[in-house]
Image (tube, rainbow, N blue to C red):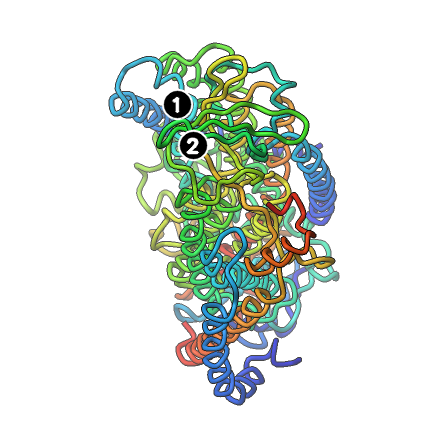
Amino acid sequence: MKFLVNPSKFNKIADYVFKPLLILSIILFALGLLFSFYLSPDDYQQGSTVRIMYVHVPSAWLALLTYAIMTLYSIAGLAFRIPFGFIINTAVAPIGAVFTLICIISGSLWGKPMWGTWWVWDARLTSVAILFIIYLIIIFMNLSFENRIVREKVVAIFVLVGSINLPIVKFSVDWWNTLHQPATISKLSKPSIDPSMMIPLIIMTFAFIMVGLAIAILRIKIEIISRKSNLI
Amino acid sequence: MSLRFQRLLLILLTLVIILSAVLLILYNTRENVSYFYTPSEIDKLDIVINETIRIGGFVENDSFNKISSNSFKFKITDEKASILVTFNGILPDLFREGQGAVIEGAFVNKDIFNATNVFAKHDENYMPASIKEDLKNTGYWNKKYK
Amino acid sequence: MIIVKDLSVDRLDKKIFEKVNLSLTSGNITILKGKNGSGKTTLLKAILNIIEPSFGSIYWKGKLLKKNLYDFYNHVTYISDKTSSLKKLTLKDNINIWKRFFCSNINNSQIETALKTLKLENYLNQKVGTLSLGETKKLEFLRLIIENKSVWILDEPLSNLDESSIELMKQTFEDHCAQEGSIIFSSHQNPGIYVTEEVNL
Amino acid sequence: MKFFNKILFFYYREYKLNISGFQDILTNIIFFFVSIFIFIFSVGPNKETISVIGVAIVWTLLLLSSTLSLKKFYQDDFENGNLLIIHLNGFSYGFIAILKTFSHFLFVQIPFLLSIPIACILLNIESDKLMYLLVSFGIGSLTLSCLGSISSSMNLMNQRNFLLGSVIVMIFSVPIIIFSVGIINMEENFNSLINILFGILLIVFAINPWASGLCLKLSLENN
């Protein structure tokens, strides 16, 4: 577990794991697309428009997951003085932003046939939009500070302050009875989704995770090298 | 007031404030900040003519009739009260009797509600169309799963 | 009173200074010598607990500085190279603000004499922005006198001062040391002041 | 007892600073009124539409004009070294943040509070809505000051684009806008919405000393 904290160990593990990860993600993506388009049935209500779910739901999960990882690492960076936390912060922010963008676009594409409008000002949609803008602010902050130490810590503080938005996104559906339907998978007792639709969803989620991990590894290695070389 | 005492005071203050804030917010969001009203809530409130509000509920079974090419009349209910709704415009393709819907509009008079737009609310269960057929002919078809 | 045991500070993984030892007791003066950018200001800030040293420790009155920081701050005045007086206000307002904000028990007559010695008495109703650089520097010394704390920590006090003012500074330093006060100041040229301890960075 | 004198005289210093530079506060208010005129000219002077969207205009413009004066928070004191002197005078960083937030509230938000009735006359908002607007802005303005303190202390060392600070304030003030405009339009569950607004204020007020204090400490350390 040391590689989660120590840059040099991370590098060793990263070189070792990167190739298989890339191949795995390509396979999973192909499988996922195959399953979601051909092998999974239409929904009894929505017909084939439900297929957008196989992109929308994984990207939503990963957007929240990346932000949760960033919050954990900024706590590690600030409270326990682990410099690797700041590296993760700067490296993972764009990946989270891209996932949130995919989530918003696929959500509105799915909303047009289902709800009748591209965008409705509803609790969950607004909080995801706010999450996207918070990601953008983090990326801009990373670009606008010269002093590295100040930049790292201020970004970490902003991630922590922005993490108030995370529970709002998660529970916005239950607090305010909104147009967006309550969480399907969270009811672990009886997930109200049919197994035949569950499989492509899981495959696509893992495909997204693999792709995210691969890009994250690349960006973290770039960040480590750039820190060692110029030490601005 | 040494620096450490200030820090202690700050920690105490923050804990008390965060606790009361969370209690305050959770208590108040529970009941009434709602995106839409249910028909039974509407009856309790005094109806204000042509003030735009949103009503959410199920479309009552066999209350849906088509007046002309794009004007419809149906009832929204939540098993406790129901409201007659007139709407002219294009209905989303998910809109059917027994299906959840959120409508936005205003009361034209005491009991007719003229909706300006209709959102079909999709509940969270997904089931393949094929299973719906064999459930139907085996008679297990549950009324709610329309 | 202030003892610094082999302090070293590094910034962005570059060593600024290493193993610096310093001890200051009441009544004497310490000078920090070194060329520009050799870390004089960083050492002063480390003593003021603004910067975290990466190694070594600082003691105030025998106890670790971090433990009784408030007491340390009650006895210390810090003059940085920046002019801390408020440019938009007149000199009189500045003096009022300093006198009240620092709760100093100095009476007006002492301020009058200080103004006369610093030859600033006829600028009282003039906005500080209009004064020259040397005069605003002398204004900093006025704040030093108004606060009248026992330990003075000065950063480049003698830069851009004319001859007569430097003489004046030497005089105020000696008076302050006579009343059991102590001074640490940094300077890149050697001012020829009687110094009990010299630290080269 | 000495400590309360210090706080008192800290505000004497802030008062002197702001009174001498009174035109800063006036420019904020003028910005507020000019943007109301722009809204009126763009929307057209018929009474009904203005009174419907009047409250929303007032609130958004108050938010925008309170992000104008972010530079005045810590930037000036940081540049001329006063922040360090205030800290050396015995105030911890979190405490400086609280004092500065209240001074920003006193010298920037209170003038806005006083200028709301005039704005309501311009936008012919009924008098009972004016009451709700004043109450909701009273709570909302302190929240905006706390957010302003957090965002301006984050951007102390950020020379390139200082606008990021106002974007941060605007992003975190979305819930404030939702609930305060909600208070004015939905009268029946009035006290519960006020409680929610008050809850948001408490959360932001509790976070402010820690976030701003840490940022101030960082900026002073790496100045």
Judging depth in this view, the residue of A99 and A24 nearest the camera is A24
Residue C189 at what x, y percent from top left?
39, 66
Residue D116 located left or right of residue B80: left
Q: Secondary structure at mark 2?
A: strand
Residue D15 at what x, y percent from top left?
48, 27
Disc 2 is attached to a residue of which chain? B
Judging depth in this view, the residue of D136 and C159 nearest the camera is D136
Q: Which residue is mark 1?
A: D53
- Kindly indicate whether the residues beneath marks 1 and 2 are on one polypeptide chain: no
Disc 2 residue type (three-letter): Asn
Disc 1 residue type (three-letter): Ile
Q: Which residue is mark 2?
A: B117
* Image quadrant in which you'd find residue D56: top left
Q: Is residue D180 visible?
A: no
Residue at x 62%, y 62% (from the top left corner): A194
Q: Secondary structure at mark 1?
A: helix
